[in-house]
Image (spheres, rainbow, N blue to C red):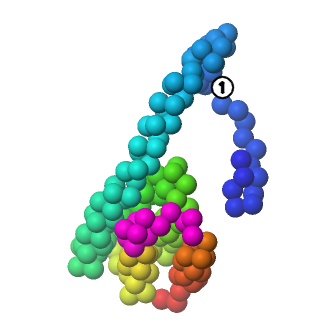
Amino acid sequence: MSQNNITYICSPDHSLRDLIGRNVDLKDVFSADIIQSCQDLVIAAQETFFPKAQLEISNIKQLYQTITAGDDVEDTLQTIRERVLNIQGLASLFGYDLVRQICASLTESQSIFQAQTSLSEKDMMLIKSLIDLLDLTCKSKISGDNPHIQEELFRVLAMAQRPRKA
């Protein structure tokens, strides 16, 4: 498996094979029809990604508003992080690298997600900017296929990830 130009070697996982049985011919289990049915399910799930992400982003925006009001910052940040991680996981699964990268930029910001009861104004601006960028990307259904848009957004994300002074 290769990720970010780093090659990982993983031990094979034989648990599914063990459940099916080592003596069973896999072509008898995974026929062309079953494989096509599975592929159809994946495509159908992929088609619902952006609408579901939009609903989740709407919830994230509401949670952000509770932070601006100063209510239960630590728990709210954790809930936002979990919801963004859900979007990130689905984006990774379906190959929406730009959405995944935006989510990663938000969830991996150490200064934001350390246990704390308040955030600096700069951290609040960063959270809002990344949520707005995520929202725009999903509303526009930008999958990351356009290299010029992706390059510009990654440039902005890199700027956002630079260490900030409190």
Classify 22 as above or below 63.
above
Q: Nearer the viewer, residue 3 or 164?
A: 3
Q: Is residue 11 visible?
A: yes
Q: Check residue 103 for magenta coloring.
A: no
Name the residue at the bottom extreme: 165
| Residue at 43%, 37% in the rendered image | 41
SS class of the residue under badge 1? loop
For label 1, the residue is 14
**In the figure, 62 relative to 14: above or below?**
below
Choose between 76 and 5: the one closer to the eye. 5
Q: Where is residue 61 in the image (x, y as percent from the top left)?
A: 29, 70
Q: Give the range drawn in magenta.
A: 134-146
Single out the residue that lies furthest toward the top.
23
The residue located at (41%, 45%) in the rendering is 45
In the displayed structure, would residue 140 be above or below residue 50? below
Q: Position of residue 109 (x, y in %)?
A: 51, 72
Q: In this view, does 41 lie to the left or right of 26?
A: left
Where residue 165 appears, x then y in whole percent? 52, 89
**Amino acid type of the residue that numbered disc 1 sits on in the rendered structure:** His
Q: Using residue 134 as the reference point, say whether residue 4 is left or right of it.
A: right
Residue 120 at least partly seen: no
Report the front residue among 48 and 108: 48
Pointer 1 local density, CA inside 10 Å: few below 14, some 14–19, many at least 20: few
Q: Quadrant of residue 145?
A: bottom right
Q: Nearer the viewer, residue 42 or 113?
A: 42
- The residue positioned 47% from the left and 67% from the top of the image is 142
Identify the residue shown where x is 70% and y is 32%. Answer: 12
